[in-house]
Image: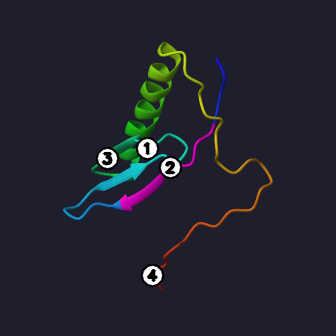
Amino acid sequence: MVEREYRVVIERGESGGFWAHVPALPGCFTAGETVEDLMRHAQEAIAAYIEVLEEQGRPVPEGDAPGAGEKFEVPLRVAV
């Protein structure tokens, strides 16, 4: 089993909850009521997506998440 890390883009849903997509895996979307639910669903969606690619004999995209030591930005809102 090969481990890959994929970037998951999370947005707030219009009617509550959250939704996300995985840019490296076109069409890989998921949703959840909480961020924790969303991330669990994202792991399941990514695994299922990759499984289908492998069954079809198609290449699996390499991960696109920042690696150790790479700089990346995360917005953080703080109430003071």
Q: CA distance from mark 3 to mark 1?
A: 9 Å
Residue 79 bears which disc, if any? 4
Tag 3 and tag 1, C-beta contact below 8 Å: no
Q: Are marks 4 and 1 in contact (CB under 8 Å)?
A: no
Residue 27 is covered by the magenta coloring: no
From mark 4 to mark 2, how far is it between C-alphas? 25 Å
- Which of discs 4 and 2 lies nearer the camera? The answer is 2
What residue range appears in magenta? 5-11
| Residue 7 is a magenta residue | yes
Earlier sequence position, callout 3 versus callout 1: 3
Amino acid type at image mark 2: Val
Q: Earlier in the sequence, mark 1 or mark 2?
A: 2
Q: Residues within 10 Å of mark 2 (few under 14, many from 20)?
A: many
Of mark 3 and mark 2, the one earlier in the sequence is 2
- Amino acid identity at mark 3: Ala
Q: Secondary structure at mark 2?
A: loop
Q: Position of residue 77 (x, y in %)?
A: 49, 76
Secondary structure beneath dot 3 equals strand
Q: Where is residue 31 shown, x and y percent of the image?
A: 31, 47
Residue at 46% across, 42% down: 26
Residue type for callout 4? Ala
Query: Considering depth in this image, is 80 or 21 the residue closer to the camera?
Result: 21
**Would you name the residue on which mark 2 appears?**
8
Q: Which mark is residue 31?
A: 3
Is there CB contact under 8 Å for labels 3 and 2? no
Q: Gap between marks 4 and 1, in whole Å? A: 24 Å
Which residue is pictured at 64% across the width and 67% down the height? 73
Q: Residue furthest left?
A: 15
